[in-house]
Image (cartoon, rainbow, N blue to C red):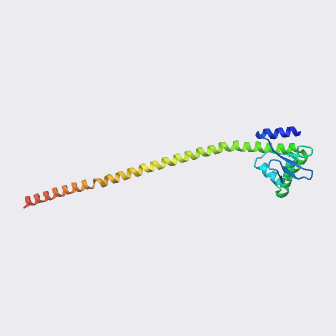
């Protein structure tokens, strides 16, 4: 990719000019926006934060962005060894093509997984809704049965004064009948 193509790709990817880092003959890196020297680690942090960065040779104006980013990957790999040996060999054999293919395959794989998960999540959500609805119905039925039993019990309790009154009236009639029987026998 030519220097101009790289600059155009960086500018259009987020619609803003990239931060220009100048690389001097002594390999020092100078941030032209913040007017200070920066390290590879700081450039890595800028990239991780989403900042567009363009590294240029101060003397020749040659675009060194890909070389610098590759150097950052190399330095990070030395520290953490995250890439498999096969991936590293493929990068050497096939260069940037393999890296681009790897990223595209990873994106496609991730997209497929997301498309697979979305219906499963929706189905799980639907089942959860059905379960909640069934639980609510069961609680409602239980509440109706409890209410009926409470009403029946309350009706029974409410009738107690009437029953006492009826009992007293029956007792009074029985007493009256007993007296009459005694009077007839007597």
Place of residue 108 in the rendered image (x, y in percent of width and height, measured from the top left): 76, 42
User: Farthest residue in the front direction?
Assistant: 35
Q: Residue at x 42, y 48 (%)?
A: 144
Q: Nearer the viewer, residue 21 or 84?
A: 21
Quadrant showing the N terminus:
top right
Nearer to me, 140 or 28: 28
Q: Is residue 153 left or right of residue 69?
A: left
Give residue 30's position: percent from left, percent from top: 85, 50
Which residue is drawn at the image coordinates 73% and 42% (left, top)?
112
Task: Give percent across and percent down for residue 140.
Answer: 46, 48
Viewed as shown, does residue 29 lie left or right of 147? right
Height in image: 177 above or below 141? below
> Looking at the figure, which quarter contains the C terminus?
bottom left
In the displayed structure, would residue 123 be above or below residue 80?
above
> In the picture, residue 18 is in which quadrant?
top right
Q: State the image coordinates of residue 171 (x, y, percent, origin top left).
A: 18, 58
Residue at (8% x, 59% y) in the render: 183
Residue at 65% x, 42% y: name it: 119
């Amino acid at each position: 990719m030519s220097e101009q193509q790289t600059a155009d790709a960086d500018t259009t990817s987020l619609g803003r000019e990239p931060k220009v880092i100048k690389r001097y003959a002594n390999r020092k890196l100078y941030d032209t926006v913040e007017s200070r020297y920066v390290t590879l680690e700081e450039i890595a942090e800028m990239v991780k934060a989403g900042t567009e960065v363009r590294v240029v040779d101060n003397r020749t104006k040659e675009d060194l962005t890909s070389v610098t980013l590759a150097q950052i990957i190399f330095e990070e790999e030395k520290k953490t060894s995250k890439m498999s040996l096969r991936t590293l060999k493929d990068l050497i054999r096939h260069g940037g093509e393999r890296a681009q293919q790897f990223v595209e395959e990873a994106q496609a794989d991730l997209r497929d997984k997301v498309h697979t998960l979305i219906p499963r999540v929706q189905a799980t959500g639907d089942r959860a809704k059905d379960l909640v609805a069934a639980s609510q119905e069961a609680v409602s039925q239980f509440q109706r049965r409890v209410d009926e039993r409470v009403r029946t019990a309350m009706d029974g309790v409410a009738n107690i004064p009437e029953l006492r009154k009826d009992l007293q009236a029956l007792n009074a009639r029985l007493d009256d009948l007993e007296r009459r029987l005694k009077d007839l026998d007597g």
